Image (cartoon, rainbow, N blue to C red):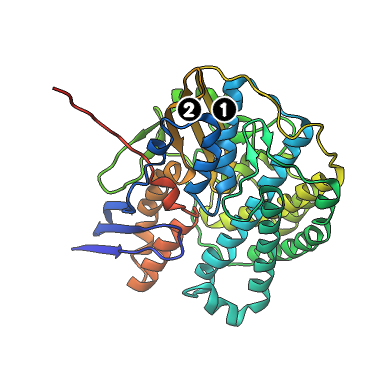
Amino acid sequence: MSKEYRVDYLARVEGEGALYVKVRGDEVVDVKFKIFEPPRLFEAFLIGRMYYDAPDITARICGICPVAYQMSSIHAMENLFGVVVEPAVRELRRLLYCGEWIESHMLHAFLLHAPDFLGYDDALKMAKRHPDVVKKALKAKKIGNDVVARLGGREIHPVSACVGGFYRVPSKRELAELRPSLIEGLKITEELLEWVAGLEFPEFEQDYEFVALRHPDEYPMNEGRIMSNKGLDITVDQYENHFAEEQVPHSNALHSYIIGRGAYMVGPLSRINLNIDKLHDLTKTALERIGFKPPCRNPFKSIIARVAETLYAFEEALRIVDTYSEPRVARVELSVRAGRGCGCTEAPRGILYHRYDVDEHGRILSAKIVPPTAQNQKSIEEDLRKLAPKIIKLPRSQAVWRFEQAIRNYDPCISCATHFLRLEVEQE
């Protein structure tokens, strides 16, 4: 006798998706993480536009992680044009990234994911029993939004970052004004990390291939080599030699895989497993105190990695604010040339790859964007397949709940993932 588990509209995820699991006896017959949100065609929008339009256009792909889209496009263009920014500009970009990690991680961890562990339908119901936790998370999130607004000109879809630097950089006094709230956010997040460590986590592990950037001197945000726990070690411009995408009938987002190997995981759990030695001391000590040890192969514990990265982001933001000196120039001059540029940064949900071909005037001829959610789709379906034999022994409502929770472990951003365009033109 077969059983089917369906959720036609997933809740507490960004975008429109569904799940389907079919089992026959103890055998898992079919698993689908369905993405039915229509394609958004951003790569097509970019064709014919100038190189300097890419950061502002790609920032509109996502209201939660616009900085990541801006930065990956900026780095791709700067790599093509041979641009080297001043150290102070580089630091400001890390600070902008800290703001995005803080606001995105707090949103997912406490408003979307934490209710799963406590049996609440949403964060509003959770807030009735845990008001202090929700208030602290919202406070920390607001601080992250303030950092993005201070550097980017506004909280959502910031506009100040550009190819070559920034249109405007803040004064030292303007950055120093952020310091009291960053200290408050750091203290709040230390408490929240202790709280999430006390949640009850399902027993579940897989032998994932964790993929993330790795930088020799710092926890990765904007730069580094692409590495994995199974031997991958490549430069960003080698990405398409090792990763590929395929279309599947049940998803409007392309599925990514490592050529010759298959599924892999990106995101906070991968980053922290591959880069825990690069965290600042306060975050390392906090993780030791709660007993978190890498490699962690339980995806349900991604909430711990997410909050730990938030704590690191507050530490890093304070370091940058305290050591900041205004750059000599906000934006360096550059020479446009034809060619291909690749960029990859660490969005809150994992590595975000951009590649552009431009002509000698800087006009974009082609664009390729691979968001983190597209890269995690195969791992999500493998988790559902592996979990199913155990979960189907639960009452149906609990089984459906656990399947949904397994998807939310990845903080999927479905709208980000559905922007491909495969266009075929026949001429007679």
Where is residue 20 drawn, in percent x and y? 29, 58
Q: Quadrant of residue 131?
A: bottom right
Residue 136 higher or lower than 178, as above or below: below
Q: In the shown orientation, is residue 83 left or right of residue 111? A: right
Look at 69% across and 65% down and name the residue there: 192
Expressed as whole percent of the image width and height from the top left, the position of residue 255 reads 37, 40
Q: Is the residue under label 2 in contact with that under label 1 (CB below 8 Å)?
A: yes
Residue 406 vs residue 315, the one in the foreground: 315
What residue occupies the far left of the structure in this picture? 428
Mark 1 nearby-residue class (10 Å; few <14, some 14–19, many ≥20):
many
Q: Secondary structure at mark 1?
A: helix
Residue 266 in view: no
> Up-down: is 353 above or below 379?
above
Q: Is residue 263 visible?
A: yes
- Residue 246's spot in the image, x, y percent? 33, 35
Towards the viewer: 292 or 217: 217
Mark 2: few/some/many CA within 10 Å (<14, 14-19, 20+): many
Earlier residue among tags 1 and 2: 1
Amino acid beneath label 2: Tyr
Image quadrant for the N terminus? bottom left
Seen at 45% across and 22% down, the residue is 241
The residue pinned by badge 1 equals: 77
Q: Amino acid at mark 1?
A: Met
The dot on residue 356 is: 2
